[in-house]
Amino acid sequence: MTDLNLRVAIIGSGPAGIYAGNILTGAVNDAGGTVAIDLFESLPAPYGLIRYGVAPDHPRIKGIVNSLHEMLDAGTTRFIGNVEVGRDIALDELQERYDAVILATGAIRDANLDIPGIDLPSSYGAADFVAWYDGHPDVPTTWPLDAAEVAVIGNGNVALDVARVLAKHAVDLRSTEVPDNVLAGLETSAVTDVHVFGRRGPADIKFTPIELRELGEVPNVDIIVHDEDFTHADPAQASNNQLKVMLRVLNSWRDRPSTGASRRLHLHFYHAPVEVLGTDRVEGVRFERTTPTGDGSVVGTGEFREIAVQQVYRAVGYFGTPVVGAPFDEVRGVVPNVEGRVTDTSSAATPEDGGTAIQGLYATGWIKRGPVGLIGHTKSDAMETIAHLVADATAGRLAAPTVTGDVLDLLAERDVAFTTWEGWLALDAHERELGQTHEHTRERVKVVPRDEQVAISRSGALIES
């Protein structure tokens, strides 16, 4: 048995990375060992998709942020932001300096929707739109909201978030932490009708009840559903209580009278996208009407419908981004692994063979298992990965670091403008102050430009060099 005195690098500071660090600290301490953890993040600020992937009108997310804040504020994990692994420092350079490296980079790209016309101008990935309205520093600060009729393809929470933000009036977002440039864009939006399309029926939606209820509470927006979609949507036959609640909500909207609202949000089920129509830009979408088969899937009916829209947002899932230097499954969009141990599949004897585990390299979160599940799944997922890391360390299967010295010294030598936890506290305080002094008082106003975030972070904290 080997004493557990470890140095570990985690790449990615979203919930997956923070949970992994917290669980690892507890596991090593319980075993009587010590662990020093460095949490690397490509953005200047922490929290990943919690900061840049959740709609600004979701106040309940504050509880998750507070929990993640407490974990990082405990001081057992060192935050190192604005560092891109593969650009500022190589993965193998981290492997030389740490006993283990955990990949927790998530999935931030849109999954593809392989139909003709999907690449026409005015056809977008939902992830890009989400990044815009969340003030991500690496996307343009403006967004073309010049279409009256918009299609959102997908039946998950992201699709609902996108549809809700598109349909919502800017005045109803003024109290949120939405950046000023986004608020200005939404105030000039030409949107009147948002159409959400799902390939399956109401009984197979991937929403959560709270997301669906929020949709029905948007001021001055009428919700429109169609009776033809509810033949197989009896709440009494729902497979679980959560679905039963959602079917009751959807069915209640069937009898909801029009209020004459200035915007409308249409929910369409049993519509499989076939083609995005248009020449120079999006002019509509062609769908095939589907019908359930009884086993949870659907088949085409041969009936086709064309619906006029001027923009399309595909919200059919996320796809992982490769980490330079690590193996990557281009089909599934994940790092190949067995229960969190990253594997070299080039050594696999057969396609079914998991390959050979790479010493000291692990994965957790969406980059490990794909973009499915909620925050609670991320925590249990990290527990599995950390259990294997600790087992490998205990059994002496990890290679000791071969390079000494603080990684911050290396980054400073390369003139990398890294940020720290103290820097984040300074940026956090600055954003909160902006919120308090804003004409529409709010909890915070996000700083969007990367260089401004870095400048505030570095001027507000002592950067050792």
Image: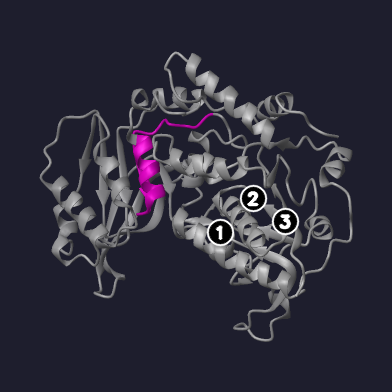
Q: Please indicate, yes or no, whether residue 111 appears anywhere in the rendered image.
A: no
Residue in view at x 67 percent, y 67 percent: 389
- If you read the primary sequence from the N terminus, does the residue marked by circle 3 or circle 2 appear first? 2
Q: Decide if residue 5 is on the left or right side of residue 188.
A: right
Q: Which residue lies under the disc numbered 2?
A: 12
Taking depth in this image into account, of 60 and 373 the one nearest to the observer is 60
Which quadrant does the N terminus fall into?
bottom right
Earlier sequence position, callout 1 versus callout 2: 2
Q: Check disc 1 and report its element: helix, strand or loop.
A: loop
Q: Position of residue 154 (x, y in %)?
A: 38, 53
Q: Are marks 1 and 3 in contact (CB under 8 Å)?
A: no
User: Which stretch did the figure color magenta?
Assistant: 142-166
Q: Position of residue 67 (x, y in %)?
A: 50, 44
**Residue 350: mark:** none
**CA gap, disc 3 and disc 2:** 18 Å
Q: Please say which color scheme the image uses.
A: one colour
Name which residue lies at 38% across and 50% down. 157
Whether the magenta-drawn stretch holds residue 381 is answered as no
Nearest the viewer among 343 and 6 is 6
Compared with 431, 282 (above or below) is below
Q: Nearer the viewer, residue 262 or 122?
A: 262
Which numbered mark, 3 or 2, is in the foreground of this view? Answer: 3
Residue 145: in magenta span: yes
User: Closer to the camera, 295 or 459?
Assistant: 459
| Residue type, label 3 | Val
The residue that label 1 is drawn on is: 365
